[in-house]
Image (cartoon, rainbow, N blue to C red):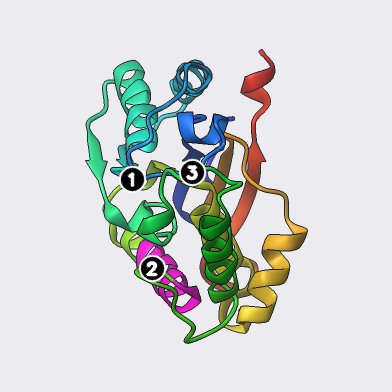
Amino acid sequence: MNIKPKAKTEKIVYFVRHGQSEDNAAPLFQGPQSPLSEKGKMQANFIAKRVCSLSFEALISSPLQRAKQTAEAIALSTHKQIDFSDLFVERVKPSEINGKPHPDKRASELWRDWEKSMSTPGLRVSDAENYDDIIIRADRALAYLYDRPEKILVVVTHGYFLRALVARVLLGDSLSAKSFKHFHTSVSGMENTGVSVLLYEGAFEQEPCWRLHAYNDHTHLAE
């Protein structure tokens, strides 16, 4: 998994999705404080072992419980201190559906309305984030990582938000609500503890920018 920086590489960021949570396994509409399941704890230990092979300078994590526990496993193995940042939390769903079972009729209806807001500029459902919010936060997160003094970082985050970051990097200013929806439809979701890598680097006759180097690598789970 180790990537040797090229001459023009300015930043390497390894993104790790958290391990399986209890709400993932139930399945429920996941609440912010759902802890790792027993399987998720095993996955966190696997990725912690794998991350030990990296020479990285900073460990950043979403403060949500499932990400926090995953980051703690990495911190224990690598002796790194965790910097928590709300920039890397999962997309914020309507609070009234948190912890509700998927078959719950009212929760399912609200979920569908919220999903529509993820591809409809200006549409807002309850107290949840929408398309505009998630793209603004993705831009802020990328700027935050760029401004960090460290060159090599590990970030523990969440599946949907990580795909939003990747969509922003791949599509740039051409990203629209329609292409965002298509991206989420056509690109596979993130495996729990899957690793994706963004580089900030230049290329021949090209200015430096964020580039996708690896997506959803989860070979460590086959060990």
User: At which x and y percent is residue 113?
Assistant: 56, 71
Which part of the image, by quadrant, shows the C terminus?
top right
Q: Is residue 140 magenta?
A: yes
Q: Is residue 145 visible?
A: no
Residue 186: name its quadrant. Answer: bottom right
Name the residue beneath numbered marker 1. 62
Q: Earlier in the sequence, mark 3 or mark 2?
A: 3
- At 61% from the left edge and 80% from the top edge, which residue is drawn? 177
Q: Which residues are magenta?
A: 130-142
Q: Dot 1: within a 10 Å radius of its alpha carbon, few (fewer than 14), some, or many (20 or more) residues?
A: many
Q: Earlier in the sequence, mark 1 or mark 3?
A: 3
Which part of the image, by quadrant, shows the N terminus?
top right
User: At which x and y percent is residue 88?
Assistant: 37, 53
Residue reaching furthest to the top = 223
Name the residue beneath numbered marker 3. 15
Q: Are marks 3 and 2 in contact (CB under 8 Å)?
A: no
24 versus 84 height, above or below: above
User: At which x and y percent is residue 4?
Assistant: 55, 38
Magenta span: chief secondary structure: helix
Q: Amino acid at mark 2?
A: Arg
Name the residue beneath numbered marker 2. 137
Q: Amino acid at mark 3?
A: Phe
